Amino acid sequence: MELIFTLTEIKRAAKQLLNLMGSNKVLAIHGEMGAGKTTFIHALCEVLGVEDVVTSPTFSIINQYLYNMDATIYHIDLYRLKNEQEAIATGVEDCLYSGSYSFVEWPEKAPAIFPNNTIHAWLYTVDINTRKLVIN
């Protein structure tokens, strides 16, 4: 499935993706640097009702956000990690198998740790205001 959206339509695209995910809670977002992975995850969090400030976890590796009063979303950025062992050592695997939403940037850094039902999405820049999300 493909979603093409402008930055002003990003929440609509986020809602569509969440509906498509159904009961699956792990989303691996692939894309080049600057494609808008963090921006899209920010939109997903807004749609789910996160009131915290959503920021890139590039240096912290894992950010946690609350929604629906007591549910957790894990926002994970694997960019700085070398392999699966580093991801496991930082607690990423625990997040992925927690049953909570886990939105992961740069999943190709540790592909073997993802659950079988992970939704993979590729984010592409069409132009300065338009993105294409290919969901697999």
Image (cartoon, helix red, strand yellow):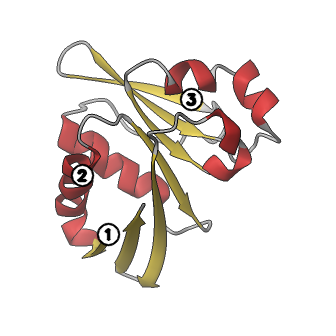
Q: Are marks 2 and 1 in contact (CB under 8 Å)?
A: yes
Q: Which mark is residue 62?
A: 3
Q: Which residue occupies the foreground of this view, 46 or 1?
A: 1
Q: Which residue is mark 2?
A: 20
* Of marks 2 and 3, the one in the foreground: 2
Q: Tell me which amino acid carries mark 2.
A: Leu
Q: Which residue is mark 1?
A: 1
Q: Is residue 36 left or right of residue 7?
A: right
How dense is the environment of label 3, judged by Cα within 10 Å: few (below 14), some, or many (20 and up)? Answer: many
Q: Which part of the image, by quadrant, shows the C terminus?
A: bottom left
* Of marks 1 and 3, the one in the foreground: 1
Which badge, 1 or 3, is on the more N-terminal residue? 1
How dense is the environment of label 1, judged by Cα within 10 Å: few (below 14), some, or many (20 and up)? Answer: few
The image shows residue 129 at horizontal and vertical percentages of 35, 80
Q: Tell me which amino acid carries mark 1.
A: Met
Secondary structure type for disc 1: loop
Q: Is residue 82 left or right of residue 43?
A: right
The image shows residue 24 at horizontal and vertical percentages of 33, 36
Which badge, 2 or 3, is on the more N-terminal residue? 2
The image shows residue 52 at horizontal and vertical percentages of 31, 29
| Residue with the most extreme top position | 70
